[in-house]
Image (cartoon, rainbow, N blue to C red):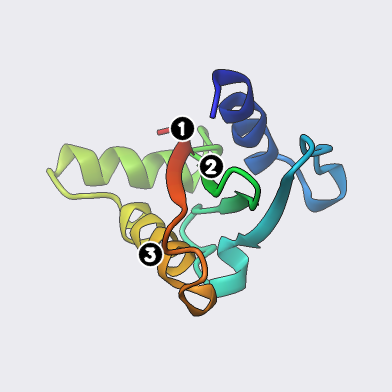
Amino acid sequence: MNHYLYALFSLDAYQDASDNINLPFGWSTIATSDSFGLSQDGYFAIAYVNEVTKEIAISHRGTDDIFGNDFDDDLLQIALGRIPDQYAYSQTFSTNIKDGFGGSLSDYTVSHTGHS
């Protein structure tokens, strides 16, 4: 993985479905947080796989509604010393990707990118 791919995948997490980027050769999307019912409370993520290099990249969307509920919720939870709800969603999504798909991806290297 290189910085360009991390930036590209991070950008893709903020795009509408109709605006998806053209993925580099060898990379494909394998799931989104929608696939597991985890796109809630402002959380969204996309997982990509490269079967040749045996790599998985998970891109997490960060706070994107600065003047709305997303930012207020994050700030309040952090101010109260609580872990934001989105953390649990990201943990579950990452586990589903790594351990899912019949265990066929268990020997792949997983990396994360995103914001917040």
Q: Residues within 10 Å of mark 2 (few under 14, many from 20)?
A: many
Q: Residues within 10 Å of mark 1 (few under 14, many from 20)?
A: few
**Residue 28 on image: x %, y %:** 73, 51
Tell me the SS state at disc 2: loop
Report how far apart the C-alphas of labels 2 and 3 lie in the structure. Answer: 17 Å
User: Horizontally, is 93 left or right of 49 in the view?
Assistant: left
What quarter of the picture does the C terminus occupy?
Answer: top left
**Residue 36 on image: x %, y %:** 54, 73
What quarter of the picture does the N terminus occupy?
Answer: top right
Q: Earlier in the sequence, mark 2 or mark 3?
A: 2
Report how far apart the C-alphas of labels 2 and 1 lie in the structure. Answer: 6 Å
Q: Say what amino acid the circle numbered 1 marks.
A: His
Q: Residue furthest right?
A: 18
Q: Earlier in the sequence, mark 1 or mark 3?
A: 3
Q: Say what amino acid the circle numbered 3 marks.
A: Thr
Q: Nearer the viewer, mark 1 or mark 3?
A: 3
- Does residue 75 lie above or below 17 as drawn? above
Q: Residue furthest left?
A: 81
Q: Nearer the viewer, mark 2 or mark 3?
A: 3
**Label annotation for residue 95:** 3
Q: Which residue is mark 2?
A: 61
**Label annotation for residue 115:** 1
**Disc 2 vs disc 1: Cβ atoms closer than 8 Å?**
yes
Q: Say what amino acid the circle numbered 2 marks.
A: Arg
Q: Residues within 10 Å of mark 3 (few under 14, many from 20)?
A: few
Q: Earlier in the sequence, mark 2 or mark 1?
A: 2
Tell me the SS state at disc 3: helix
Q: Residue furthest top?
A: 3
